[in-house]
Amino acid sequence: MTDPSVAPAHRPRPSVPDLLVALGVLLLGGLLLAGTLQIPFGISAVVGPRAFPLIVSAGTLLLGLALLVSALQGHRAEPAVEEDTDPTQPADLRPAALILGGFLLGAALLQPLGFVLGTALMYTSVGYAYGERRLFLLTGVALAVALITYLAFTRGLGLSLPAGLLNGVL
């Protein structure tokens, strides 16, 4: 016999933000997989140029699927114990908007400015979004990291990246 004073357990409703994150990860995994399948086979039949991107896209798809199942079961992403956040307060979207804006601006200016300056712009926006206000230091570190990255890719791996305004200097 059931106890009428005990309410039946309600399954929590899926969280819309968690569902959006899961669908975004699934979309990203699908796009990665579509791009990976366009890479031509290399000389080696076992491990070619598709191997690593295929592993990353499959992992991304599995992660998105796990997030989707978890969100549909009503599990919510909760902040870690060590995070100093209040889930009841509205989210501050300024840092995310600053990072996204810096990324979009850097990507748009990558060809005319070059990889080093465009990437330094992206790094600077991320550092500023995370609270760094020493702009001279932030810009210097961003330029140094972008230059090291440029040299590693162009000299170390033989890839071609746009030099932009620094053409002839690099």
Image (spheres, helix red, strand yellow):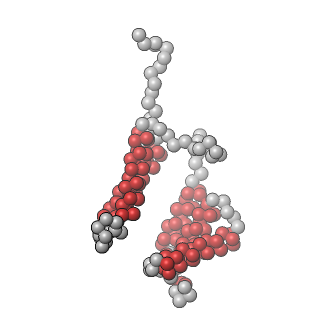
Residue occupying the point 57% across, 75% down: 148
Q: What percent of the width, then of the height, locates residue 60?
A: 41, 54
Tell me how many marks there are.
0
Where on the picture, by quarter, is residue 165? bottom right
- Looking at the image, the residue that sits furthest to the top is 1
Which residue sits at x=58%, y=68%? 123
Q: Nearer the viewer, residue 43 or 124?
A: 43
- Let me know if residue 137 appears in the view: yes
- Quarter placement of the C terminus: bottom right
Q: Which residue is located at x 64 percent, y 45 percent? A: 82
Q: Nearer the viewer, residue 108 or 147?
A: 147
Percent x, y for residue 161? 47, 79
Residue lying at 60% horizontally and 68% vertically, measured from the top left = 124
On the question of residue 111 being in view, the answer is no
Relative to 70, say whether 98 is above or below. Answer: below
State whether residue 67 is above or below residue 98: above
Q: Is residue 113 above or below residue 133?
A: below
Q: Most extreme residue toward the bottom, as rendered?
A: 168
Q: Is residue 132 above or below residue 146?
A: above
| Percent coordinates x, y for residue 93 in the rendering | 57, 54
From the viewer's perspective, is 155 left or right of 59? right
Quadrant assignment for the N terminus: top left
Q: Quadrant of residue 36?
A: bottom left
Give the image location of residue 164, x and y in percent. 51, 82
Q: Is residue 75 left or right of residue 82?
A: left
